[in-house]
Amino acid sequence: MQTNPHVRVHDLSVSYGSTPALNRISVDIPEKQITAVIGPSGCGKSTLLRAMNRLLENSDGVSLSGSILIDNENIYDPGRDVTEIRKKMGLLSQKPYPLPMSIFENVAYGPRIHGMKKKNEMAETVRHYLTISGLWEEVKDRLHEPASRLSIGQQQRLCLARGLAVEPEIILADEPTSALDPKSSQKIEAEFKHLKNRYTIIIVTHILRQARRLADYVLFMYLGELVEHGPAAQIFENPQHEMTKEYIRGIIS
Amino acid sequence: MRSSFNKFEEAVFRFLMIVSTLVVLGCLFLIIGTVLFKGIGSMDLDMITRTPQGGYYLGKEGGVLNAIVGSIVLTSSATAIAFLASLPVVLYINIYAGKNSRFAELIRLSLDFLWGIPSIVYGAFGFIIMVYFGISASLLGGIITVALFILPIMARAMDEVISLVPVELVEASFSLGSTRIETASRVVLRQTLPGIISAILLAFGRGIGDAASVLFTSGFSDRIPLSLTQPAATLPLAIFFQLGTPFPEVQERAYASAFILTIIILIVSISARLLAARFRRHTIQ
Ligand SMILES: Nc1ncnc2c1ncn2[C@@H]1O[C@H](COP(=O)(O)OP(=O)(O)O)[C@@H](O)[C@H]1O
Ligand SMILES: [Mg+2]
């Protein structure tokens, strides 16, 4: 099942100072599927994800070349509004970082800065996205408590709801379950499966089994290179590249 | 062998901890105790409700209301100005320039340097500026000088807390499509509010207790200042003048004034702590 590419990375290179982190990556990420980025730690997975959200330019000494097209527009074109680009994507980090405010305000934050004013519309929005992220039942009676009081697993789902509330097209998740217990990880994975009908999901993971469970499409990276990419079945059952074979078999990790 | 050494080590540290705690608490009580003991005889309602009457410094009637009001008005205004001036700088170096950038380090270095300058130098500097602009010793002169004096203290204290905000938190806000200003005002400030309140308090405390910076710049008057251009009395100078008289009963009033100053600082400290605790519940660890 081949779908349209949603994100097209073309000849992307990134280096931190003089250390190269990504070397001429080109790949098309399919729309409304789960794409897993796998590879040993330090191979540039996070860097690739951050490049898509234009978060790299906040660090000192980062140089970047190449292009990333989302809906056929290069997000690195000068003059593109970076907040509009980021609005198209929801980001989940390794450890959840709720905003320093209440559960309700966390979800309302995005819609509010993008201009939503009506109170009942906001309440409805918050309820909607907390429901989608599977948190509503657990928090509906304490929406105005600080988000910091939730468990880590709940915080991660709150971050998911918060990201979805700005109505992105793409979800970027960088090892979103690595700080979570198995039960919470399972919940997040289940959410992702639900969400893939409506969103393009790109998940970085170093857990091979997770990639097997979730991915429709897989990118395998090694030392800043994109070694191999393709539909999940192909990468897992019939990898072409020697390095991919070894990684899949657990020889390198 | 090893475990007995560990025990010994632990005993030494425990001893040091107890001693240093006692030294700190001892100093605190000794200071408050001395001030209270020496000033209690003169501590009456007049002290805080009346201004000096004729012959006050010779031992006649009155109080130091002029200095209480002067100190509070002067230091609050200076604190407000220092806050308005330092907040943008601190947010700028941490969110726009980048907290590890060269520019941020340069600003920090300058602030540290300014922090180290003694307040008498600020007083002298303020005095020269006032002469240049033709301002005489007044409430305004004192406010400007104290604001300059406490600005580096406040800015550095705020910088310490703001630079501790996790990058991921800032990025989380960015990734929701918010601008730097929205991120600074809605996320970073909320996260650091308790620390910012402490920074303001620290600066206020330093400002209200300092005599040298107001010595040449705010003047001194027995009346409560009614405008910015009138001279204003302050508690540190009131203490200084009263201690300088040859009359024991006036010197005793100096201690009573010192006690009042201590109480003001105590009240501000405690209320700031309570306030900070209220905002801490949202802080993300
Ligand atoms: N902010 C940074 N400054 C300098 N080097 C970095 C920075 N972030 C990542 N790197 C380096 O870039 C390479 C790729 O890192 P990263 O994208 O985080 O890999 P992964 O997510 O696959 O573990 C690593 O060698 C890492 O040390
Ligand atoms: Mg990573």
Image: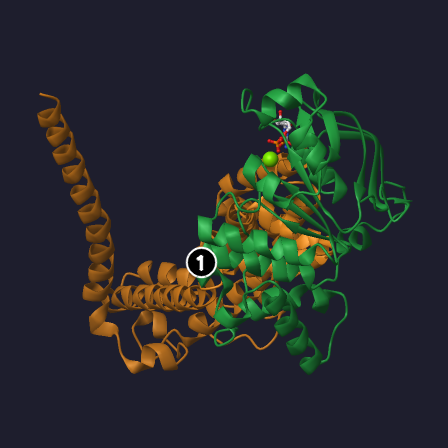
Is disc 1 surrounded by few (<14), some (14 to 19) or many (20+) residues within 10 Å?
A: few
Q: Nearer the viewer, residue A126 or A192?
A: A192
Q: Residue at x 64, y 67 (%)?
A: A129
Quadrant assignment for ligand 2: top right
Residue B217 % position (x, y): 56, 57
Residue B128 is at least partly visible in this image: no
Q: Residue at x 58, y 63 (%)?
A: B80
Q: Chain of mark 1?
A: A
Q: Residue at x 19, y 52 (%)?
A: B26
Three-letter code, disc 1: Ser
Please give the letter of the chain rendered in green.
A
Residue B43 is at least partly visible in this image: yes
Colour theme: by chain
Residue A176 % position (x, y): 57, 46
Q: Please state, as top left, top right, bottom left or bottom right, where the N terminus of chain B lies in the image.
A: top left
Chain B colour as displayed:
orange
Residue A54 % position (x, y): 76, 43
Residue A71 % position (x, y): 88, 49
Q: Is residue B72 left or right of residue B258?
A: right
